[in-house]
Image (tube, grey):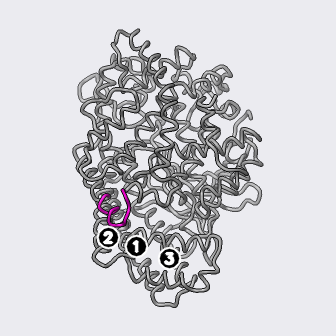
Amino acid sequence: MDGDVRASLGSVTPMTTSHDPSSSTPPDPSTPPDFTGATVASVQRAVDDAIAEAEQHVADVLATDPGFAHTLAPLDQLTATLAEAYGRGPFYARVHPDEEVRNAASAAEEKLRKWEVGLASRRDLYLALEAFAETDEADELDGEQARLLAHWRRDFRRAGTHLPERQRAEAQRLRERLVELEVAFQRNVDEYEDAIEVTRDELAGLPDDYVEGLDEGDEHGTYKVSLDYPERFPFLQQAEARDRREELAFKAGNISVEDNRAILGEVLQLRDQLAELLGHESWAHHAMEPRMADPDRVEELYDELIPPLTSAATQEVDRLEELLAADGHDAPLRTWDYRYYDTRLRREEHGLDPDELKQYFPLEAVLDGMLGLTAEVLGLRYVASEDADAWHEDVRRFEIRDAESDEHIAWFYMDLHPRPGKFTHAAVFPLVPGRRTQAGFVRPVAAIVANFPKPSGDRPALLRHDDVETLFHEFGHILHDCLTRAEFARFSGTNTEWDFVEAPSQIMEHWAWHPDVLKRFARHHETGEPIPDQLVKQLVATRYVNRGLSYLRQCYFGRLDLLLHVAGEGRDLEAINRDAHAVTLLPFHEGTFTPASFAHIMGGYDAGYYGYLWAQVFGDDMFSRFEEEGVTSPDVGREYREKVLEPGGSKDAEELLRDFLGREPSKEAFLHQLGIND
């Protein structure tokens, strides 16, 4: 579709209003929350007030006879209270510009999570829930209500609340210490800063707009290249100075290593002890119990995929080493060479120049295209606020409305540019869970936090295509959180099986590569000319270039995570890291310790990083329906919205898949994309 997406689809229009999110009564759904004015005191108060309210919910449960309205309903309100407290407190540890507020938010996160640990150890609450489970009313529950009861009972069992008092106390002690360590690990990664200083000559290969965006170095005439994604990855992809690429890669491989190596070791030991106490073979077995997979099924996935990926990657390494040799360097290809020669190969053999390509991806055009696409396919309308009332001036706020009924659905925020102390990766944070209350449906609120280039003066923010893909991916999480129609906070949005949660985002990535979609919004930032068909063909032709190496790197992190959590007492972290890294086919970068910044395994992906690859299998399978019936089909999109996004975690993920696919899930689409079964 040609023309301006904002104007032609009417998907984005401006409005302004504000509301205090701390209000105890459900807000007018047309009034957005206000996230300005956070202070150390307000962050602490948000968590203290939430804990006090949650304590009252617990007291209400214990003071009444068993019944859904008196037992489970207050527990779900408790879940919502804690979730909203996260958005008004701990969330600021990831995004707030004031270091004192970030530190207070980090401490508040630890306090909140420890209270949750204590909740799961409440024997009296566990007995009250079990008393309700024995009633006739509980026997007659069905659907989402029956699921809520089953999940709460499972939570208490997994917390060890059924154990004798001494073991129960030990389980709580272990979990509280884990909270302290996990929060500290993430804080160390978020706050870590480092850079290399380079001369102008050592920036050869990089475009002028990249150089202009760098800070000056301490030495006259030098520039700083930081570890932030918008600076690190282009340098590794395009800088001709091989020794400086090596230096930057070395620093990236040692983020927070002095503090986090010891933290990681203690965390793994404590998880071992807790898993044994709870009767599990390993932490991996414990962590995967509520997920789709188990350690054996994950190993089967890797056993099936790694051999053909290795075969493809071996040929890819050979080709890249030919380019390495042509530059006068001896084999083997190293970790700091891969991105550079991958970029060279795409340019020289497929004619794809990343600097030329990004001229067609100014951030504003990409946002308009993504919003216009999802508005059309999913039946939505987006309303942009003139004033975001947010934690930083860079943040934007949008309202989501149903295109047909004009019903308000949700609010979301976009915090897209790097700054000191901010969360260093890309992620979506749910701030208010959607759920149904006596006062009506509480509309969800979520935020995407990323680190894309920032416009400067007359220079727009130009995205690399992998930035475009990342933006589409994360927006999949926004849609999952914001379109939920789950009855309970417990199942709101992405509160589904952890190894399914990436699948709706994997779907979004396909649109970022589809020619018809790209040509709808990719425009040259100076001339406004649409992206040439030839350039689109060149881009699409490179989608699976060096796919073996790329997926083997993902397998490295998945296997590292798995090995760390099945190894048991006496594990050698260095040896495990090297063993897992061997799958990449590239020599290990001596002196580095990447696990020290592997924050995923402290933030819910412990023994779960395999989920990215696992979920991609299902994401590809679901997208096959769009490929068969229309890549931008509103009919398929509406069904996808209703059967996958809106239920959230209110149904088993495999049931959602069967509902949408009309058959059993399959690996066929994923394998076909990779050419493995051709």
Callout 2: helix, strand or loop? helix
Looking at the picture, how far across and down is residue 664, in whole percent?
Answer: 67, 50
* Dot 3: element: helix
396 lies left or right of 102: right
Image quarter (top left, top right, bottom left or bottom right) of the C terminus: top right
98 or 575, nearer to the observer: 575
| Front residue of 643 and 661 | 661
Image height of 375 relative to 104, above or below = above
Q: CA distance from mark 2 to mark 1?
A: 8 Å
> In the image, what residue type sits under mark 3?
Leu
Q: First in sequence, mark 2 or 3: give its number.
A: 3
Residue 214 locus on image (x, y percent): 37, 30
Residue 426, image x, y percentages: 46, 45
Disc sitting over residue 306 in the figure:
none
Measure how far apart labels 2 and 3 are at the Cα level.
20 Å
- Who's the residue at 61% across and 45% down the image? 619
The residue singled out by tag 1 in the image is 120
Badge 1 element: helix
Image quarter where the N terminus lies is top right
Which amino acid lies under the numbered mark 1 shown in the image of this protein?
Ala
Vertical arrangement, residue 76 with respect to residue 380, above or below: below
Residue 281: in magenta span: yes
- Label 1 to label 3, Cα distance in Å? 12 Å
**Residue position marked by numbered label 2 in the rendering:** 172
User: Which label's residue is closer to the chain start, 1 or 3?
Assistant: 3
Question: Answer yes or no: do the residues labelled 2 and 1 have beta carbons within 8 Å?
Answer: yes
**Residue 48 drawn above or below residue 469:** below
Q: Nearer the viewer, residue 289 or 476?
A: 289
Give the residue drawn at x 37%, y 58%: 281
Is disc 2 surrounded by few (<14), some (14 to 19) or many (20+) residues within 10 Å?
many
In this figure, which residue is indicated by the disc labeled 3? 75
- The magenta stretch is 272-282
